[in-house]
Image: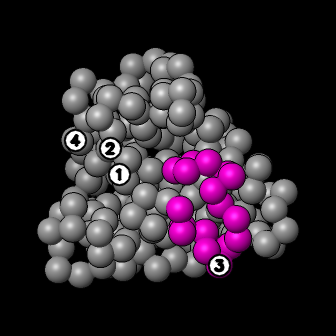
Amino acid sequence: MGYGNIMKVQTTGASWQTAQQDKLPYSGERASHTMAETDAGRMEKYRSMISTVGKKYGIAPALIAAIISRESRAGNALEGGWGDHGKAWGLMQVDITPTGGNHTQRGGWDSEEHLCQATEILVYFIERIRGKASFRNAEEQLKGGIAAYNMGDGNVHTYDRVDENTTGQDYSNDVVARAQWYKNNGGF
């Protein structure tokens, strides 16, 4: 893919805080893999759309699936398509608040149009991170872009502290580990 190889991105996986969403007695990559596997059955109904959108934007479908898993648990954590106390929309949780992303929702919460919008936002942030000197190669830039998808590129300063401002202080590490699971085990 044009934005780095998700399988070559280094990751530590989910933090203890994130792992507690599923009451797991462990954290790290194992916890991320367990959560991805938990969402795998629900993810199946989106497989075709995820593949189409991934090809369209040059983003690994496994990465899109991983963001869906982290953000909405493949739709399971949403109420009427809304999450984050009504501040974010859809499977990939596009922020619609003026103090957040200030995006306008596009399409249904589980539509290809929504996945396109969210993936465009991800690509935008990867491109923004490419301009930061501490992100030396495509894989580091990809990981930085994933962190920026969660908190904005102004909150992602250096590669060695990529997740210091993200939700759970593990967003990109958890998403990368889930993406690697979806690539290896989910067929994405």
Which badge, 4 or 1, is on the more N-terminal residue?
1
Within 10 Å of disc 4 (Cα), the crowding (few <14, some 14-19, many 20+) is few
Density class for disc 1 (Cα within 10 Å; few <14, some 14-19, many ≥20) is many
Coordinates of residue 31 in the picture (x, y in percent): 29, 74
2 and 4 marks in contact (CB < 8 Å): yes
Q: Image height check: is 38 above or below 118?
A: below
How far apart are the two marked residues, 2 and 4, measured between alpha carbons? 6 Å
Q: Is residue 153 magenta?
A: yes
Judged left or right of residue 181, residue 96 is: right
Q: Sequence-wise, which precedes: disc 1 or disc 3?
A: 1
Number of the label disc, if any, that sits on residue 72: 2
Q: Residue at x 17, y 80 (%)?
A: 25
Q: Which residue is mark 1?
A: 69
Q: Residue 128: percent from the left, percent from the top?
A: 76, 50
Range drawn in magenta: 149-165
**32 is higher (above) or lower (below) than 115:** below
Residue at image point 46% right, 80% down:
12
Q: Residues within 10 Å of mark 3 (few under 14, many from 20)?
A: few
Q: Are marks 4 and 3 in contact (CB under 8 Å)?
A: no
